[in-house]
Amino acid sequence: MNSLARRDVTRRHFFGQCGVGLGAIALNQLIREDGLAAIGPKIDPAHPMNPRVPHFAPKAKRVIYLFMAGGPSQLDLFEDKPKLRELQGQAPPKSLMEGKRFAFLKGTETLLGSHRKFAPAGQCGMTLSDLFPHHRKIADEVCWVRGMKTDVFNHAPAKLFMNTGFQAPGRPAFGAWSIYGLGSEARDLPGFVVLQSGPRGPRGGNTLWSGGFLPTSYQGVPFRGKGDAILHLRSPEAMTPNRERHFYDTVSALNRERLAETGDPEILTRINAYEMAFRMQTSAPELMDLKSETPETLALYGVKPGEPSFGANCLLARRLAERDVRFIQLYHTNWDSHGGPGENLNADFEKVCAQVDQASAALVLDLKQRGLLDDTLVIWGGEFGRTPMGENRATIGRDHHVDAFTMWLAGGGVRPGLIFGETDELGFGVVRDPVHVHDLHATLLHQLGFDHERLTYRFQGRDFRLTDVHGQVVKGILA
């Protein structure tokens, strides 16, 4: 036993201490080959969140991404298709179905027109259904991208694809790429914050805001929508500020000693996380306290103090933006309108629309009146759209559709009041100005000041990027 123990210690000593220190060699090699010395940004490993200068002058300083988890039906919200109503109940044209794959359709389904009432809104004439009355107030403030396309038709992989540019876990989220490239100006709050609402979390879970192979400092930090933003952040009652400061300093010293021994860059992440947690004991409660908001602002968002909701999260998103948080992502479920219990296109769809309509519009209007919209990029959309065919279920619903769906963007140098893209008369495919997910990512990074082909991170011998080997900036939507 003693011989084995001595052998184990000797091995550790050899790898950690021997000669010039293999741990230090490994750290230098990682820095040189796996990220920090690639053509990505120059980063001080001891201060990974320090603000950095992008490739060129950005139009947007921060992002608020309103992610509608489940895939909203564009055909019941944004796209009026009279021909689809006319042909309701008929089989779709075979020419449109050839070579297509769907999550649940069996080939026996028929066309389903929307029974919603549509009317043009704003000077741009964007058609909106009666389910989104508040969106009519922002019709000329946002850019309507009607020609979105994606590659993946199941929820978790499609959410990953929309967030990371790849359909399997392990890649960094768009928010993590943003923090990696720009750092954060918020000293007392994380650079990438996630807020959730709805009956459950999004399929895919925390892989959707993961840092992937980037240093974990850049991953998203989920905040709760009520009470303490993060559990166990408060100090124990018997802990005085001086004792707590001494505790953090002691832990930091031990971590730095271990860092010198091993060269593990994740220890720096741990050190920075402790320091952020200490500062957030003051900043997080102040952020979550809505008492400073006027009754008029609460009414604008439809927020009732103390009640968690998508509206409350939108208001928190504005407050986070005011505090220089770089990337704020909201997830709201459930938009998965297949038909059946809890997922029909009648009462269930009406409910989820009512939960997000007012607050989504309020966020744009509030940012504008406070002078924040010009340099804040707001994104609204899901992982895919919905089919022109109905599903054979107990109640009305639609399957997942990757070939045509709608998203909208506002602020951050995007052209307001623009309807970009067009789909065919049945809403099956894009006939003008298609925008693939990779194109969207390239465009969003462009607005943050980055050439998407140059914002890379070397991992396992390859330079990775958000857009992989694809993507074109969609110049037609830029102001």
Image (tube, grey):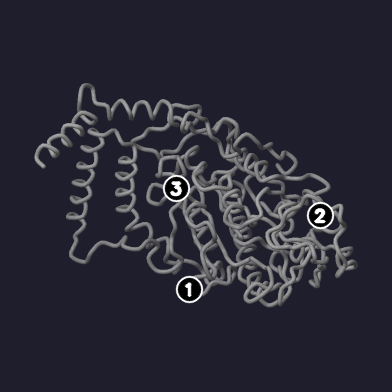
Q: Name the residue under label 2.
A: 97
Q: Can residue 324 be seen in this view?
A: no
Q: Distance between the residues labelled 1 and 3?
A: 29 Å
Q: In the rendering, at what x and y percent does residue 386 appear?
A: 72, 61
Please tell me the numbered disc located at residue 305: 1
Circle 3 SS class: loop
Which class describes the residues within 10 Å of circle 1: few (<14), some (14-19), or many (20+)? some
124 to the left or right of 43: right
Amino acid under disc 1: Pro
Quadrant housing the N terminus: top left
- Which residue is depicted at the point 48% across and 31% down? 458
Q: Residue at x 49, y 67 (%)?
A: 293
Circle 2 residues within 10 Å: few <14, some 14–19, many ≥20: few
Which corner quadrant holds the C terminus? top right
**Mark 3 highlights which residue?**
219
Asked if the residue under mark 2 is in contact with the one under mark 3, i.e. CB atoms within 8 Å, the reply is no
Foreground residue among 354 and 341: 341
Give the image location of residue 150, x and y in percent: 68, 49
In percent of width and height, residue 325 lies at: 47, 50
| CA distance separating discs 3 and 2 | 40 Å
Instruction: For residue 27, say whether it is visible.
Output: yes
User: At which x and y percent is residue 314?
Assistant: 55, 62
